[in-house]
Amino acid sequence: MDNLSSEEIQLRAHQITDESLESTRRILGLASEDWNMTGKMNSL
């Protein structure tokens, strides 16, 4: 990583940010599904 240009570093930073955001979306989706299932099971 020593020989990367500032543009390459910026591009990689954006890629990491995008990956992190997508991971967060997946986690929130799973948490939401779990919360919905818990509510449905508690109402049985």
Image (tube, rainbow, N blue to C red):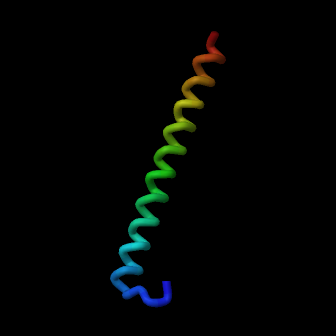
Viewer-proximal residue among 30 and 3: 3
Residue 15 position in % (x across, y down): 40, 66
Viewer-proximal residue among 43 and 10: 10
Residue 23 position in % (x across, y down): 50, 51
Residue 36 position in % (x across, y down): 55, 26
Q: Is residue 20 above or below residue 41?
A: below
Give the side of residue 10 with respect to residue 43, left or right: left
Residue 25 position in % (x across, y down): 46, 47
Residue at the location (53% across, 31% down)?
Answer: 33
Give the side of residue 18 with respect to residue 38, left or right: left
Find residue 31 and report its image quarter. top right
Q: Quadrant of the C terminus?
A: top right
Q: Is residue 34 above or below residue 18?
A: above
Residue at the location (59% across, 31% down)?
Answer: 34
Find residue 5 and report its image quarter. bottom left
Give the side of residue 7 with respect to residue 32, left or right: left
